[in-house]
Image (cartoon, rainbow, N blue to C red):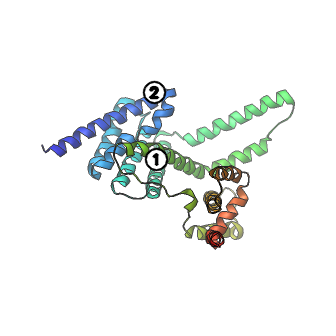
Amino acid sequence: MPENQTRRITHGAMMVALFTILLAISTYIPVVSIVTIWFISLPIAWYSAKYNRSSSLLVAIVSIVISLLFGGLLSLPVAIVFAIIGFVMGDVIRTKKSKIYLFMSTAFTVLISVTLEYIISVKFFNIDILKETMTTLHESYEKSNEIVRSMTGQTPISTEHLTTMFNTMQILMPTIVTLVVFFMTFIVISVNLPLLRRFGLEVPKFAPFRDLRLPRATLWYYLVVLALSLFVKPDEGTFIYMVVLNLSSILSILFMVQGISLIHFYMYQQGWPKWTAVVGTILAFPLSSFVTLLGIADLGFDIRGLISGMTRK
């Protein structure tokens, strides 16, 4: 057996073992898992960044199978998600793509895998995690209402308002899941890339946040969604209503991020200290409507170009 193939197999076996250990710790040791869960994908990412795609895919699959044997069905969904994150991260690093490509490709792959896991859970095991979570939250709010009512004689949230709030949350569940997946992926990438760099790998870097620009096509998507909500006016509870509400929520968040990026760009051009950007970001949340409009205007009218021109003068 050639030396490089022996080394590849040996390294693969070590990464499978390390992946399984990290997954077992994260599954069965609650306190330690707060830290270790973010590093489960590291062994697969490291291996995938060094070796070809077929070998890396085999290591990822073997890691999932071994995790199933040691951790049972309880660990299988987590093993699949983190093995996918590691495989995609390493593959993007090996092919020397940009960090934004790494982030988006990893997040969308994880989103697809989580969606498939949810569908399989509902169809074959009759376990609807999202529905059970919503039911538990609703019951908790009702109990809290009863406790406050018994102590003060007043109801903080009426039953009708509570029902409306949870119905809206249920409709927006695709948006909530998407945001959670993207946020989780961002954390995993942020904590693992510095370690991979220490292991001698050349990892990509994000461009400065102030230079973030959404594709101009995003503005057209927003106009289409806005037209649907204004002129079609889908009935509440229909599929079109759910799609329009989720798309408008996601697009509003994207434009808000664009607006915050514009604020950072302006402060940088003016030479303001870095702490002002932190304050501006914090203030952007209570002023989210205004910041979202800033993001839309920046994408439509290139406000950054005007700021750059004024700064040069």
Kindly identify the residue that appears in the image at 38 percent across and 46 percent down: 197
- The image position of residue 243, as x and y in percent, is 61, 59
Q: Amino acid at mark 2?
A: Tyr
Q: In the rendered view, would you say 280 is above or below 293?
A: above
Q: CA distance from mark 1 to mark 2?
A: 24 Å
Can I make out residue 240 in this image?
Answer: no
Secondary structure category for the residue under label 2: helix
- The image position of residue 287, as x and y in percent, is 73, 55
Of residues 299 and 135, which is closer to you in this image? 299
Q: In the rendered view, would you say 21 is above or below 174?
A: above
Query: Left of 157 or right of it: where is 138?
Result: left
Give the farthest residue toward the right: 153
Query: Left of 250 or right of it: where is 27?
Result: left
Q: In the rendered view, would you say 98 is above or below 300?
A: above
Of residues 177 and 142, which is closer to you in this image? 177
Kindly identify the residue that appears in the image at 44 percent across and 40 percent down: 77
Q: Disc 1 vs disc 2: which is toward the camera?
A: 1
Label 1: few (<14), some (14–19) or many (≥20) C-alpha neighbours in 10 Å: many
Kindly identify the residue that appears in the image at 77 percent across and 45 percent down: 161
Query: Label for residue 189?
Result: 1
* N-term-proximal mark, 1 vs 2: 2
- The image position of residue 86, as x and y in percent, is 39, 45
Image mark count: 2
Label 2: few (<14), some (14–19) or many (≥20) C-alpha neighbours in 10 Å: few
Query: Label for residue 28?
Result: 2
- The image position of residue 205, as x and y in percent, is 45, 54
Q: Amino acid at mark 1?
A: Ile
Q: Quadrant of the N terminus?
A: top left
Query: Left of 305 or right of it: where is 22?
Result: left
Secondary structure category for the residue under label 1: helix
Kindly identify the residue that appears in the image at 42 percent across and 54 percent down: 204
